[in-house]
Amino acid sequence: MAKYFEFSKFGTNYRKEIVAGLTTFLAMAYILAVNPFILGDAGMDMGAVFTATAIAAAIGTLIMGIVAKYPIALAPGMGLNAFFAYTVVLGMGIPWEQALAGVFVSGVLFLILAVTGIREMIINAIPQGLKHAVAAGIGLFIAFIGLKNGGIVVANPATFVSLGDFSNGPTLLAVFGIIVTATLMTRKLTGAIFYGILITAVVGMIFGVVEWPKSIVAAPPAASAFGALFGPLTDMSVMLTGTMLVVILTFLFVDFFDTAGTLVGVASQANLLKDGKLPRAGRALAADSIATIAGSVVGTSTTTSYIESSTGVASGGRTGFTAVATAIFFLLALFFYPVISTIAMQGAVTAAALVMVGVLMASNLGKIEWDQLEESVPAFITVIAMPLTYSIATGIALGFILYPLTKIVKGDFKKVHPVMYVMFVVFLLYFLFLRE
């Protein structure tokens, strides 16, 4: 095994790789509590989602480690799960089984792009400003959801939203969690978000805001959503609609660029790039797409590469064995559902994780060319529309419509890639005729 993963070439060993795998797991273990909470809002069984989350993470991470040989872990992606639950299911009224079918199709399309080489053309077609805007907008959207779930932001008939009641126990607990998690992250503690959730949960239990778990270890809940997508997937009257096309394209778009950015970022940190390019890029992207396909079958939203993998690299992980170790820890986590479910059911406990992930994603705002209005206007509308319309798809669509228009007005229409004009037409038709 050491020979297969080329330990000697990268100056590593089993101990370093296992420690790195554990570090990565701790940095992203919060998804085991947050994903069931978010998809639970879509009407899915939280126990089934927990099991699907752990299994999808283990499968995707194993494939990434063994086939692509990168120290990168995968799990259901933040932002994509919010789009699944709040935009597709709750906003568009699409049943979660049909939404899973959309995830499956997006994974298949991603796999085709990965093995045919079309991915480079698409990556080059989308302007950098819009890529950064999408990431930042998703960050604001996720943070808004966290503040809402924690009771920090509440509905108001006069102003739409306002500050929550700080005499309310869950709201105070959410504020406490944000402060604790922010402190841990500022101190650069590995797994800060995960530990922030644990500390918040324990404090909540002590003060009676959160129930104590009835047990620590138990058999994993049944993956009752397994195969639920196949019904709508085989019904062409359900899948071949304009709304589903937009859903699938959004799943594909966000996953595609999130994955590309993560792969390059982590590989660069580990000094694995060659002449600025990512070796075995096709394998890595294929691993990500297969993870999405497998995750949708098991019963969870899009599975994607996690930037938290960089914590494992910082701990010395350099080969795919790091990912193998992380996958094993996800499988072991299956047996701790009683504890994790107690945490997942409390919006006040998971609020901090959503807000802090939002902070990290919002850092993309600094990469937008704000002094170039033809770039900044579409970017700003993309960012602000996501939280204000409670829809990631709407933000992306508005940005893709505005970008070619501002470039045409500027006289730079030749600088816009043909793919962007195609997307302009698709999203314009969606707003005019297809949006329900």
Image (cartoon, rainbow, N blue to C red):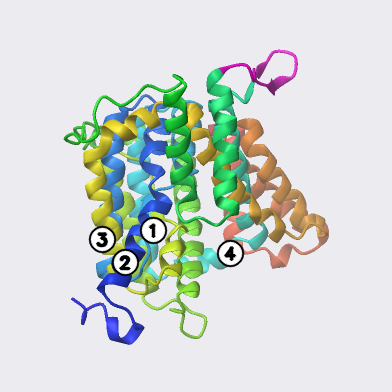
Residue highlighted by disc 1? 24
Residue highlighted by disc 2? 322
Disc assigned to residue 62: 3
Q: CA distance from mark 1 to mark 3?
A: 14 Å
Residue lying furthest top: 157
Q: Are marks 4 and 2 in contact (CB under 8 Å)?
A: no
**Three-letter amino acid code at disc 2?**
Thr
Q: Are marks 3 and 2 in contact (CB under 8 Å)?
A: no
The mark that comes first in sequence, 3 or 2, is: 3
Residue highlighted by disc 4? 125
Q: Position of residue 294 (x, y in %)?
A: 26, 49
Q: Nearer the viewer, mark 3 or mark 2?
A: 2
The mark that comes first in sequence, 1 or 4, is: 1
| Helix, strand or loop for disc 2 | helix
Q: Position of residue 358 (x, y in %)?
A: 58, 44
**Three-letter amino acid code at disc 4?**
Ala
| Helix, strand or loop for disc 4 | helix
| Helix, strand or loop for disc 1 | helix
Q: Position of residue 22 (x, y in %)?
A: 33, 58
The relative height of residue 333 versus residue 85 in the rendered view (above or below) is: below
Front in this rendered view, residue 203 or 9: 203
Q: CA distance from mark 1 to mark 4?
A: 32 Å
At x 28%, y 77%, the residue is: 13
Disc assigned to residue 16: none
Q: Is residue 296 magenta?
A: no
